[in-house]
Amino acid sequence: MANLKEIKRKISSVKNTQKTTRAMKLVSSAKLKRAEEVAKRSKVYAAKLTELLNEIAQKMQQNNTDGIDNVFFKENQNPKNVDVVFVTADKGLCGGFNFQTIKRTNKVLAELRNSGANIRLNGIGKKGIAYYNYNGVAMKTMIDDLSSAPDYKRAKEFIDGLTEDYVEGRTDKIILIYNGYVNMITQEINQQQLLPVDTASLDLNSVSLSELEVEPDEDDTLMNALVKKYLEYSMYYALLNSLAAEHSARMQAMDAATSNAKEMVKKLSVKYNKARQEAITTELIEIISGMESMK
Amino acid sequence: MKLMKLEIVTPDGVIFNDEVKQVTLPGSEGEFGVLADHAALVSLLDTGVIVIDTTDNKEISVAVDSGYVKVDEEKTLCVVDGAVALSGDDSSLAAAIEEAKELLDKSKNSATAIAAAKSKVESIGKRY
């Protein structure tokens, strides 16, 4: 027979856990609302920036029939040095959110290794960094506290460093991996090739522009400025998006945990009542049999 | 007079999206005005002030940090890093002007561009 006291203690402990998970869920849903709002507003800006880049790239392609002649657009068929950037959360307790990103990163790393490229791994977010540290994978940069509080300046500093390496030929490719927000209950892994600018993702043949004047028109001043901005913003947007996704994932995980706890309390209560009933029955039997024997 | 669409987008969202008569933009090669049916154009924007002529013959000034503008026949699209609209009554205008000056100070452009933009912002304050 299960100990009554023990079951009672278990019930109260599960109830406490339930309180915690419910509170965490509420906190996450409040934070999610804010993060979602920020991500949504930034999405417009990101879309317009891409649109601009799109049109200028079109113009450049029209001028040069053999592809776009700009360092940011030169596709290297056989990349030797590749920067891989991943974004995870700083905190856990959000279901498979972080692990999905890590899984995809591992896949990308394996593919790159097979093709014989040198990889520089750049980590943003404590959870992913902790994973690769534990597994003994060397990382070039490790950035804490950025994914939980996206900051444009820090994102810019980081991506500018990578861009400089790319321009000076130290790297041939930059890949960004993060878990993005789709809606309240769905997250989606995004894998984006930042550099060279992926012309496949730009819709180069949408509108045929007759004449597009570009100012300042010497060199690639405008193009370079625009690509840099595009990169910085893509990085920043990835952080915002990832944060919104993290909160939605945590909300879901905590919701599931709360209902699991509820289920458990129910089961334990049934067990407790049964045990209590059993104890009473035993006692009654004892009393009756005692009385019987006294007759 | 023919109207055109003007859209100003910042990282904080769309701050202006309406039909306008004319817009004057602080291009990096000099200030220029855009009317409807303007030839397609893409330009860098310096730190400065965008002046919008609205359909009801009012002028709206918007202080902007650097950015880009894309003009085509029916639409003008400004993508800027930061923007503060200078409009409203006395008290809110004064606040907006302070905010605009702050924004301009933070911009990374040349000191002359910032100074020119600031004096423009100040002159708007005096006009009312």
Image (cartoon, rainbow, N blue to C red):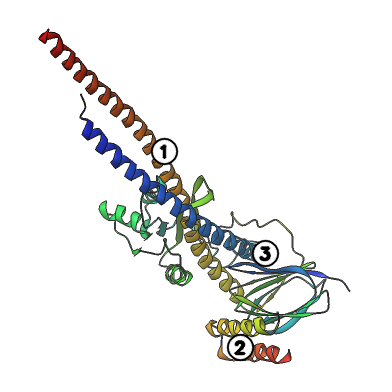
Amino acid carrying mark 2 in the image? Ala
Dividing the picture into quarters, in which one does residue A148 lie?
bottom left
**Depth-wise, is mark 2 or mark 3 nearer the camera?**
2
Within 10 Å of disc 2 (Cα), the crowding (few <14, some 14-19, many 20+) is some
Is residue A157 depicted above or below A100 in this figure? below
For disc 2, the marked residue is B113
As drawn, the label of residue A158 is: none
**Residue at (55% x, 70% y) in the render:** A229
The quarter of the picture where the N terminus of chain A appears is top left
The answer to whether marks 1 and 2 mark residues whose Cβ atoms lie closer than 8 Å is no
* Image-quadrant location for residue A78: bottom left
Q: Nearer the viewer, residue A178 or B97?
A: B97
- Secondary structure category for the residue under label 3: helix
Chain at tag 2: B
Residue drawn at x 87%, y 71% is B2
User: What type is the residue that disc 1 sits on?
Assistant: Ser
Using the rendered image, report if marks 1 and 3 lie on a common chain: yes
Q: Nearer the viewer, residue B125 or A171?
A: B125
Which numbered disc flags the more N-terminal residue, 1 or 3?
3
Evaluate whether label 1 is on the same chain as label 2: no
> In the image as oriented, which residue stretches furthest toward the left?
A294
The answer for how far apart the CA atoms under marks 1 and 2 are is: 60 Å
Q: Which mark is residue A55?
A: 3
Name the disc covering residue A259, or none.
1
Of all chains, the one bearing label 1 is A
Q: Secondary structure at mark 1?
A: helix
